[in-house]
Image: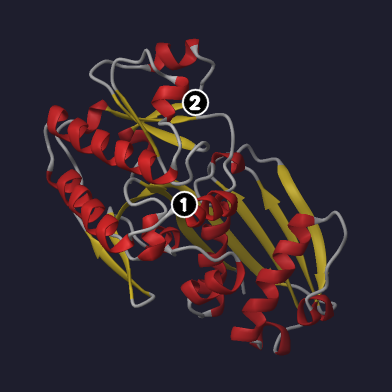
């Protein structure tokens, strides 16, 4: 019997890094995501094919059930190894998909280019969890790690306020539809950031959490309450400036867009993936002239 599951992509607007330590984070599910289809297979194996948004396949391989159970590893095959780890951890949480099956044919389709960083891994984890009826946050923790906000985005169709309380995810749907939404854009920086290395850098520099987190929580609350362009710009500038001080890194606007008449804010891991742009005029030409061709409006990106 054929089954298909779908999960939304994600963008983290506030609380980057600090969300790992209990700060509130405003996160937005995207119109882009990934689906996963399972059909019966045979020979005690999984045949896996993954397609990019343009219809081209970027991964195609077969996993014997025995490889999954033993968590086999192969030299110079990082995608295969990653999938075996996910399947192995899923097996530990619910072994029935191996013990009670002859095989599976699994196909995944992204609706965004996989290098965009909108949640290739988190959408896969959530789809797998839906299929196997296991907890997606546990599967994430046992594989990639992270705060879990991306899983919350995968599961929700509205903006959310996400927070870890005593290590457990608290997800609250919120209204984030400022009057100036038409002035918000998202620009891809032509490079994918490694979240693990960024988190390590954050850990090495952070201190005084008991003072820092409440300050950022207040900024997140302020951003949620702002409707007007000028007020939202002030709140975003404050968030970006204070995060720059914590990380000891210059703002992306300073390094790449110092002459831009508007505000540019890093999202998620600083230095890669998408940035948020707040601009009174359509900034497409400015960013194209700088070599950044991928620009999406708020309505094009966000559910």
The x and y percentages for residue 139 are 55, 74
Left or right: residue 10 versus residue 108 is: left
Please tell me whether mark 1 sits on a helix, a strand or a loop: helix
Q: Which residue bears the numbered disc 1?
A: 205
In the rendered structure, the answer to whether residue 47 lies left or right of residue 137 reads: right
Q: Which class describes the residues within 10 Å of circle 1: few (<14), some (14-19), or many (20+)? A: few
The type of colouring in the image is secondary structure
The image position of residue 71, as x and y in percent, is 78, 76
Does 228 sit above or below residue 27?
A: above
Residue under label 2: 294
Residue placed most toward the observer, 241 or 191: 241
Query: Where's the N terminus, which quadrant?
Result: bottom right
- Say the numbered circle drawn on residue 268: none
Query: Dividing the picture into quarters, in which one does residue 102 lie?
Result: bottom right
Q: What is the secondary structure assignment of the residue under circle 2? A: loop
Query: Residue 186 at what x, y percent from top left?
Result: 39, 32
Q: Residue at x 65, y 88 (%)?
A: 96
Whole-percent x, y for residue 4 in the image:
54, 64
Residue sitting at 39 percent across and 75 percent down?
Answer: 167
Q: CA distance from mark 2 to mark 1?
A: 32 Å
Point out the residue furthest to the right here: 75
Mark 2 or 1 closer to N-term?
A: 1
Tell whether label 1 touches label 2 (CB within 8 Å): no
Residue depicted at 34% across the width and 60% down the height: 156
Identify the residue at image location x=30%, y=41%.
Answer: 242
């Amino acid at each position: 019997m054929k089954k298909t599951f779908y999960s939304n992509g994600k963008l983290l607007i506030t609380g980057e890094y600090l969300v790992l330590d209990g700060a509130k984070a405003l996160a937005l599910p995207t119109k882009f995501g990934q689906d996963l289809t399972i059909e019966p297979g045979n020979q005690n194996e999984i045949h896996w094919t993954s397609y990019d948004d343009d219809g081209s396949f970027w991964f195609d391989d077969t996993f014997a059930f025995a490889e999954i159970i033993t968590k086999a590893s192969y030299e110079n095959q990082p995608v295969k190894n990653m999938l075996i780890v996910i399947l192995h951890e899923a097996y530990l949480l619910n072994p029935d998909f191996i013990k009670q099956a002859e095989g599976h044919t699994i196909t995944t389709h992204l609706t965004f280019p996989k290098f965009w960083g909108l949640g290739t891994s988190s959408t896969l984890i959530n789809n797998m969890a839906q299929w196997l009826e296991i907890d997606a946050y546990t599967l994430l923790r046992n594989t990639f790690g992270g705060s879990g906000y991306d899983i919350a985005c995968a599961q929700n169709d509205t903006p959310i306020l996400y927070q870890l309380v005593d290590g457990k995810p608290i997800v609250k749907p919120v209204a984030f539809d400022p009057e100036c939404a038409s002035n918000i854009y998202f620009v891809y920086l032509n490079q994918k950031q490694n979240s693990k290395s960024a988190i390590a850098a954050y850990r090495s520099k952070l201190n005084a959490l008991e003072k820092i987190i409440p300050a950022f929580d207040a900024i997140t609350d302020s951003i949620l309450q702002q409707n007007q362009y000028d007020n939202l710009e002030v709140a975003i500038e404050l968030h970006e400036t204070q995060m720059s001080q914590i990380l000891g890194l210059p703002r992306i606007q300073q390094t790449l867009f110092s002459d831009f008449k508007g505000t540019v804010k890093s999202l998620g891991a600083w230095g890669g993936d998408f940035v948020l742009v707040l601009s009174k005029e359509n900034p497409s030409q400015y960013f194209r002239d700088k070599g950044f061709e991928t620009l999406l409006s708020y309505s094009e990106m966000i559910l």
